[in-house]
Image (tube, rainbow, N blue to C red):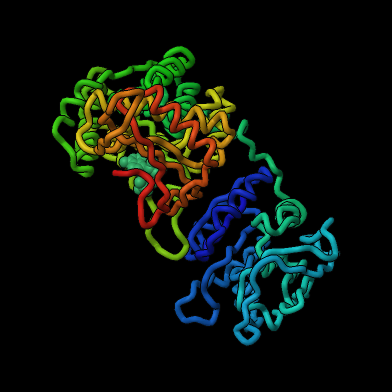
Amino acid sequence: MIIILDFGGQYNQLIARRVREHHVYCEIMPWNKPMEEIEAKNPKGIIFTGGPNSVYEKTSPHCNPEIFQLGIPVLGICYGCQLMAYTLGGKVGNANEKSEYGKTEVAFDTSSKLLKGIGEKEICWMSHTDFVTELPEGFRIVGKTATCPAAAIENPEKGFYGVQFHPEVNHTPRGTDMLHNFLYEVCHCSGDWTMTNYIEDQIKKIREKVGDGKALCALSGGVDSSVVAALVSKAIGKQLTCVFVDHGLMRKNEGDEVETIFDGFFDSHFVRANAQERFLMKLKGITDPEAKRKTIGEEFIRVFEDEAKKIGKVEYLVQGTIYPDVIESGLGDSAVIKSHHNVGGLPSVVDFEELIEPLRLLFKDEVRQMGMELGLPENLVWRQPFPGPGLGIRVIGEVTDDKLEILREADAIFREEIASAGLDRSINQYFAVITDVRSVGVMGDFRTYDYTVALRGVTTTDFMTADWARIPYDVLDRVSVRIVNEVKHVNRIVYDVTSKPPATIEWE
Ligand code: XMP
């Protein structure tokens, strides 16, 4: 395995993804992880990430110098390169505080192991002000630009390499080959990290852990919970019960689709708790968004508890927690944990001995890959995010059966048209909202007074910020014409053109 020490750079997870793409397992750790814990992992190599600081600042993160005595190769990227040079006795400075930013040509000495097969001049992505001005003992320069004399440095005897540019980003076209060289030429990794191996390994571990005990899984129909259910089902079959709480706030046909996949396809017990009425009753008269969310969340737990009680004693709870939710950040010492509103409260209210979280080390696209290998249908594996409270927060005002029905139909048309325009993978999330606004329209010779449906489409990588998707007018036009013609009680369609911030992705 490879350890990636996180110094707070923006591309840290990308480095991890790149390493895994080369079939080498890696983990991200905060820069101040104790040496014993690093050593205990027995890594074949260590990568220092970039970071926003300057090595001379008092508060900047510094590695333990002993790391260079472990006999393990190190690759420093950007700040990581400067830190390595500085820690080993070199000097770091800047050229009149002038930054080098963007695509830059670097001249390489390709006799370096790191640069094997790379051209003598390559475009690389730079983003820095500081750079190494004096090499530590034993180092030599193997790459330079017009303004940065030490764009790539090495001490091949020790296995220490540093690059001022970012090999992990696409703007450095040969960067992935350089990482490959570090992993295979320098660290001699065996490259046996594949999804097939990972699945087999996890199945073995789950079987050992559960023994002849029982496990319970809350299945929402989302990507993570579906993949984890499929994996654990493969491992322990009938010892697993998947409880799918159907709150009636799913999109068109979604509840039935989940049932068809999991009831027919997998070997474990599948329970669909048909709680649609229960949720509607609880939501009656509630219009405040937060009150709605709370009501749905609480009722979800009550229904789940009722089902769990019917099953009897269960030792394990299966959860689809994934790696981005658990990565410890390099600059904060606290773990960054996303607050999920859907199944967040479960472990404390239901009595389990232990959690099973086999996706804890996987990135989202790896989870999808696992889903495909486990035989889940493509439309489920590539499903866009869907909030735990479901359509409850896309019906503005009171949630009623009638409004839900209108929304489901309008949303299905929107999704259908986006897919047939081939935009379903480029727009990261898109959905319809039924507003509480009614307006006057005319249909045939008649005056109408009906609902306004809002369409929302966003592009984003992390869902923390988002831009509104530039959906072509002709696609929007088709959606609009179809909804007002095919869905009763809708006579007006609007498209949401706000980014996040200041708006959020969901309307409530
Ligand atoms: P906002 O509306 O906060 O949404 O910009 C960001 C992303 O989170 C999803 N979302 C939720 N997901 N439970 C979830 O599991 C929730 O309560 C919830 N609320 C919002 C939203 O769909 C978007 O992808």
Q: Quadrant of the C terminus?
A: top left
* Rendering coords of residue 332 (x, y %): 41, 64
Q: Residue 158 vs residue 205: left or right?
A: right
How many numbered discs sit on the rendered protein? Answer: 0
Q: Can residue 309 be seen in this view?
A: yes
Q: Residue at x 62, y 64 (%)?
A: 70
**Residue 267 falls left or right of residue 146:** left
Left or right position of 60 against 402? right
Q: Where is residue 96 in the image (x, y as percent from the top left)?
A: 63, 87
Q: Position of residue 244 (x, y in %)?
A: 34, 23
Answer left or right for 319 relative to 164: left
Q: Is residue 217 visible?
A: no
Q: Nearer the viewer, residue 381 or 371?
A: 381
Q: Which residue lies furthest to the front in this view?
A: 445
The foreground one among 505 and 447 is 447
**Residue at screen point 35% across, 30% down:** 316
Furthest residue toward bottom: 96
| Camera-side residue of 114 and 396 | 396
Ligand 1 falls in which quarter?
A: top left
